[in-house]
Amino acid sequence: MKFEELTVEQLKAIEEEFKKGTIQKILEQKTRVEEKTCAVCGQKIAKQHGYALEFGQSDLRKRAYFCAADCLQYFLDYLKKENLTQYY
Ligand SMILES: [Zn+2]
């Protein structure tokens, strides 16, 4: 996309969205998605794949990502084995 080819209206719309923080927010979300790594093996997780587990107190939710069901299972087993479920 070339900014020179956009109309004044389109540029103004972009500027408006930028001021509202929309662009920063979208950018943040997209970057976050791409940076997801598996909590167990550390492997990068492709955009549309993997598992997310939300846990913790309702006011302090944590989210962990896993590349495959095996890693998710490993994480849950670890919590149970170490008796950590009471903390999460
Ligand atoms: Zn993994």
Image (spheres, rainbow, N blue to C red):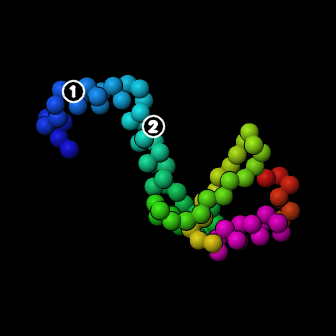
The N terminus appears in which quarter of the rendering? top left
Q: Viewer-nearest of labels 1 and 2?
A: 1
> Of the residues shown, which amino acid type is indicated by label 2?
Lys
Mark before the other along the chain sequence, 1 or 2: 1
Q: Is residue 44 visible?
A: no
Which image quarter: residue 10? top left
Q: Is residue 81 visible?
A: yes
Say above or below: 9 vs 82. Answer: above
Q: Residue at x 86, y 62 (%)?
A: 83
Q: Which residues are magenta?
A: 70-81
Instruction: Give the SS element for disc 2.
Output: helix
Front residue (pair 87, 49): 49
Residue 75 in the magenta stretch? The answer is yes
Whole-percent x, y for residue 80 in the image = 82, 66
Horizontal side of residue 42 vs 31, given as left or right: right
Whole-percent x, y for residue 41 in the image = 60, 69
> Of the residues shown, which amino acid type is indicated by label 1?
Glu
Say above or below: 57 vs 12. Answer: below
Horizontal side of residue 39 vs 77, given as left or right: left
Which SS does the magenta portion mostly show? helix
Q: Residue at x 72, y 53 (%)?
A: 55
Few, some or many residues within 10 Å of mark 2 (<14, 14–19, 20+): few
Distance from the alpha carbon under mark 1 to that under mark 2: 22 Å
Instruction: Give the SS element for disc 1.
Output: helix
Q: Which residue is mark 1?
A: 9
Horizontal side of residue 86 vs 42, given as left or right: right
Q: Which residue is mark 2?
A: 25
Whole-percent x, y for residue 14 in the image = 29, 31
